[in-house]
Amino acid sequence: MTVRIPRSSSWRASRATGRRRPGRTTAALLTAGALLTGLALAARAGTSEPAAPPSASRLQRDADAVREAGVTGVLVRLTTDRGTRTVRSGTGDLTTGRPVPRDGYVRIGSNTKTFVATVVLQLVGEQRLSLDDTVDRWLPDVVRGHGNDGRRITVRQLLQHTSGLPDYVGEVAPHPSAAEYHRNRWTPYSSARRVALALRHPPAFAPGTRWQYSNTNYVLAGMVVRAVTGRSWEHEVRSRILRPLHLAHTVAPGDDPYLPRPHASNYQQFAPGGPLIDTTVAYLPFDGDADGALISSTADTNAFFAALVRGRLLAPAQLAEMRRSVAAPGDPGTPPGSRYGLGLAWTPLTCGGGYWGHGGDGYGSMVWPATSADGRSTVTVALHSRPGDPGTADRQIRATTRLIDHALCAARDAANGAVRG
């Protein structure tokens, strides 16, 4: 699942899994050898999209640059006051060579966290809980053991990743490999079990003293939502966000591991130089909870983040709390100056200002939405493969952040030009 401030939203570099932080899976994308293999398969199929000519739009050229960094298939949707543009690069299936669907379903991974944080902040606005409530206030005795203590951790610290709690992901994917993926992908885990697995380890630091991404925080946030409302986090997301915004292509699949159609195939390289493994089927040990379960589309993802930043989902006081951020050290590919609020990340733009977003990844996929500070321009980038070495992963992140930077800066320039005209 992930955020990357932006990177997946995924920049999590979980020690046991090699995951990049806001994402929730292994750090993998494609090495050069695997990339050549995948693109050769697509070329033989004869239907992958060709490289854009010099006259192609900047958005298309940037999407091609992401593909050339080692991604099998890329989908980009940019929505501004002037309309929506969608570009694709690569292939959506290495066997058939079919293109990436323009309106396909994607696993949005840790972008789920922003939905869950929004629900929690709505409950704060309704005075049904406080950000300063302890975890123990709502989940008595759940967080105990090896120095972890829910009496010292607040709801705010869960949402901001400043709790110090260990990440359960290293327990459910201890040795990321194709064999482990195929052996365990059907195994569901309850929220309580995920938390119990995390608590086998001591905290990384005292609550509130540092920042470190941990998926355990949002598993607990989902449990808090149930404790406050008597209903699951999925129910609250549907009733409070999806229905009011008419996000018909965003679903919480529970333990169903399959993507609705249409969708592109996802591919994970589990080791440098290794083969690309089709990982379109979910890995239920970490694809099934409040830290990263949602399935959506680039259109719905754009609509959600734009509505959130424009204040359609939260009152001003709660939106201000969500935007109160702390420095969030990222991976080498993460832009400097990135920060993390309550389920929402801030990244600077080269043209000044910055954008809000998150990011999410899983085995074989990464989805990175970004919206301008005023919510008038939003872009979501979906990648359909992940590499097996950190160097390739960082190159892909840099290519993705350049695309976002170019798109949002160009949209701002166009809007300012329209005003001047």
Image (cartoon, rainbow, N blue to C red):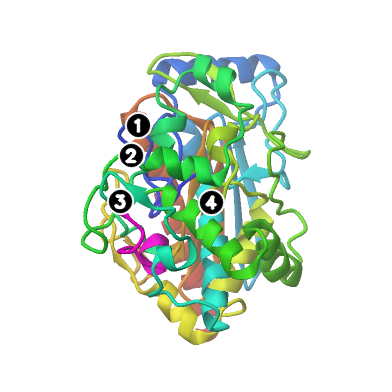
Q: Are marks 1 and 4 in contact (CB under 8 Å)?
A: no
Instruction: Calculate the distance from the C-alpha at mark 2 to the C-alpha at mark 4.
Output: 29 Å
Front position in the image: 396 or 111: 111
Front position in the image: 284 or 343: 284
Return the residue at label 1. 18
Q: Are marks 2 and 1 in contact (CB under 8 Å)?
A: yes
User: Which element is circle 2 on?
Assistant: loop
Q: Is 327 displayed left or right of 397 in the figure? A: left
Residue at screen point 37% across, 40% down: 20
Magenta part of the protein: which range? 149-159
Return the residue at label 4. 59
Q: Amino acid at mark 3?
A: Asn
User: Which element is circle 1 on?
Assistant: loop
User: Counting residues from the N terminus, which is met first, the one under dot 2 or under dot 1?
Assistant: 2
On whether residue 127 falls in the magenta region, the answer is: no
User: Counting residues from the N terminus, which is met first, the one under dot 4 or under dot 3?
Assistant: 4
- Residue 375 in view (yes/no): no
Q: Residues within 10 Å of mark 2 (few under 14, many from 20)?
A: many
Give the label on residue 13, or none.
2
- Residue 244 in view (yes/no): yes
